[in-house]
Image (tube, grey):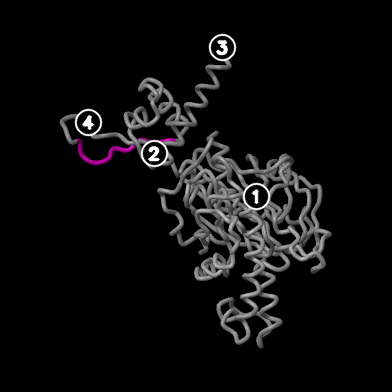
């Protein structure tokens, strides 16, 4: 075995051990050896490295069943560092901070004051600085481990923003300026990709999972064989611009009749304002209950089902998570949608509403930053049940 092989195996073992500690929340050294199949010497050596790096801490838990020392359990040192997830939407930025265990610790929302991306980037940096100064004093000695940024548009495999229909941003790289200002690793991805990653990490850790975001537009995030599927250059998942009406409404992308013009929740709200007796700002529940809303909602669900039918027949996903303010609060809509999926070709296990809601992209960005920092193949916070956190919008 050459030096390169030895280094690779050590890194692989490191990843395996950290993944099991995270997944199980706490484990003894002997449990780690048993679960992973690694010998005790390897486990002990790696764990000593984790402790020296402040990534893992030891805890004496309970009383020993037999005579001797109390069992010593290992767990991730949540207060050693923190990560940041950012979702840059049409009019605001949603920002979530999580500790090294992935627990949400702070959330802020910023109204975008200028559509210019350079201005948005500077606004983000300046807004983060006071929080960083405070959190660096609490979550140490590692501090900020990384930032994950979600963009509502096309992002290539080099983290470059290729095009955003809403803001018309094109061929821009914000990764380098953010890394230089924040002095940490930054990853930029499509918001739907980060959303589906969050669904896998925080709610159901399965190898094949789709997430469709339905807020201001429509995005599709795909997990295939435990990896985010990006496609050839990173453009996969722009399903909102699938044409469902050949001579339909004009879209900022350049086409006509794109799915998100009919099935994004913004489109439904616009139609409800037009077809019901109410205008202006009103809460969503009241809007849905207005006289005249039923046929509008039914038409919306028809369009939503058309796109879902296409996705199911093309990809045959195991599970689809629908994430939108209306869908998440109205689970009966899921049943109605499934009744509209009449094709004999449809084959899937489950369609359900998101438990993470509007925070999914930011949460996924923060989790991805931790995964990259720790050098993991996968990260699993399902057992921690963070979906009940008051910081996560339902």
* Residue placed most toward the observer, 166 or 251: 251
Measuring 55% from the left and 49% from the top, which residue is drawn there?
209
View extreme (left): residue: 67
Measuring 47% from the left and 44% from the top, which residue is drawn there?
380
Q: Name the image quarter holding residue 229.
A: top right
Q: Is mark 2 on a helix, strand or loop?
A: strand
State whether residue 75 is above or below residue 317.
Answer: above
Q: Horizontal and vertical percent for residue 66?
A: 16, 32
**Structural crowding at the residue carrying mark 4, measured as other residues with C-alpha within 10 Å and reported as few (<14), some (14–19) or many (≥20):** few
Please name which of the two marks, 3 or 4, marks the residue nearer to the observer: 3
Tell me the number on the disc at residue 240. none
The residue tagged 4 is 69
Distance from Cα at disc 1 to Cα at disc 4: 46 Å
The residue tagged 3 is 2
Tell me the number on the disc at residue 75. 2
Q: Is mark 3 on a helix, strand or loop?
A: loop
* Residue placed most toward the observer, 235 or 169: 235
Label 1 vs 2, first from the N-terminus? 2
Distance from Cα at disc 2 to Cα at disc 3: 32 Å
Please name which of the two marks, 3 or 1, marks the residue nearer to the observer: 3
The residue tagged 1 is 149
Label 1 vs 4, first from the N-terminus? 4
Q: Name the image quarter holding residue 93.
A: bottom right
Label 3 vs 1, first from the N-terminus? 3
Span of residues in magenta? 56-64
Indicate left or right for 129 with 14 as reference. Answer: right
């Amino acid at each position: 075995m050459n030096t390169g092989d030895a280094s690779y195996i050590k890194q692989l073992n490191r990843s395996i051990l950290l993944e099991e500690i995270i997944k199980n929340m706490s484990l003894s050294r002997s449990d780690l050896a048993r679960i992973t199949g690694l010998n005790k010497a390897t486990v002990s050596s790696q764990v000593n490295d984790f402790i020296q790096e402040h990534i893992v801490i030891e805890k004496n838990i309970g009383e020993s069943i037999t005579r001797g020392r109390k069992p010593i359990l290992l767990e991730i040192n949540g207060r050693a560092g923190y990560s940041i997830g950012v979702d840059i939407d049409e009019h605001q930025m949603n920002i979530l901070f999580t500790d090294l265990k992935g627990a949400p610790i702070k959330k802020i929302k910023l109204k975008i004051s200028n559509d210019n991306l350079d201005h948005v980037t500077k606004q983000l940096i300046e807004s983060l600085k006071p929080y960083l100064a405070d959190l660096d004093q609490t979550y140490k000695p590692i501090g900020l481990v990384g930032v994950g940024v979600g963009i509502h548009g096309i992002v290539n495999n080099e983290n470059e923003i290729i095009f955003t229909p809403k803001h018309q941003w094109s061929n821009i790289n914000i990764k380098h300026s953010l890394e230089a200002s924040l002095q940490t690793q930054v990853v930029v991805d499509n918001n739907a990709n980060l959303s589906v990653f969050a669904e896998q990490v925080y709610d159901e850790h399965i190898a094949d999972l789709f997430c469709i975001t339905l807020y201001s537009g429509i995005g599709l995030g795909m997990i295939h064989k435990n990896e985010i599927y990006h496609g050839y250059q990173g453009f996969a998942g722009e399903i909102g611009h699938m044409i469902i009406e050949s001579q339909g409404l004009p879209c900022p992308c350049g086409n006509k009749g794109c799915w998100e013009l009919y099935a994004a929740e913004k489109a439904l709200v616009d139609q409800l304002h037009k077809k019901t007796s109410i205008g202006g700002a009103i809460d969503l529940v009241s809007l849905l209950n207005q006289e005249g809303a039923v046929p509008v909602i039914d038409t919306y669900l028809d369009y939503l089902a058309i796109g879902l039918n296409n996705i199911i027949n093309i990809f045959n996903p195991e599970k689809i998570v629908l994430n939108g303010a209306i869908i998440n609060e109205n689970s009966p809509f899921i049943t109605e949608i499934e009744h509209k999926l009449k094709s004999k070709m449809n084959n899937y296990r489950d369609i359900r509403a998101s438990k993470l809601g509007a925070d999914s992209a930011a949460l996924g960005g923060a989790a991805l930053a931790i995964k990259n920092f720790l050098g993991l193949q996968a990260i699993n916070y399902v057992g921690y049940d963070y979906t009940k956190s008051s910081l996560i919008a339902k």
